[in-house]
Amino acid sequence: MKKLVAYFSASGVTRKAAEELAAVAKADIYAIEPDVPYTREDLDWRNKKSRSSLEMQDETSRPKLHASIPDLSEYDTIYIGFPIWWGIAPRVINTFIENSDLHDKDVIVFATSGGSGLEYAVNDLKKRYANLKIRSGKLVKGKVKEDMA
């Protein structure tokens, strides 16, 4: 079976980590992109009315995806990467998970962050999706040099 690195990147940092992971893990890659791209103003976490702030305050927020999710049936390992927002995964990650068949898959979470740790975000996903096999990969700081599986 194969591996897939699915990632959301707002600024390019997570994209770089995902590309490095895909190379070392010999995995395919898929960009999780919202239908409406985020602007710099949307990402201003200091502004309580910014798009990202409003999404993260609303637990039911599920930004629509730009493209359809690929057929995941040929993969046994799915890495899901994202920048940590407010200690957890951005809501677009919930959209991806809820619209993907991840049952019987090993789901490995990795993230980038300016200050938050990974475990709180992983535990939040495990709690939300208790029926999935989700585990912690790594908080990426610097270059990805090895597979996280």
Image (cartoon, rainbow, N blue to C red):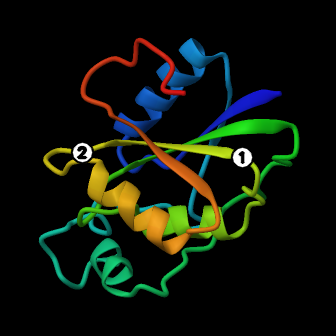
Left or right of 90? Residue 24 is: right
Residue 89 location (% of width, % of height): 39, 61
Q: Nearer the viewer, residue 106 or 14?
A: 106
State the residue position of label 1. 105
Left or right of 53? Residue 98 is: right
Residue 145 location (% of width, % of height): 41, 12
Q: Residue at x 54, y 68 (%)?
A: 94
CA neighbours of label 1 inside 10 A, class few (<14), some (14 to 19), many (20+) = some
Q: Nearer the viewer, residue 131 or 50?
A: 131
Amino acid at circle 1: Lys
State the residue position of label 2. 113
Sequence-wise, the earlier of marks 1 and 2 is 1
Q: Residue at x 38, y 79 (%)?
A: 55
Q: Which quarter of the figure has residue 143? A: top left
Give the SS element for disc 2: loop
Give the SS element for disc 1: loop
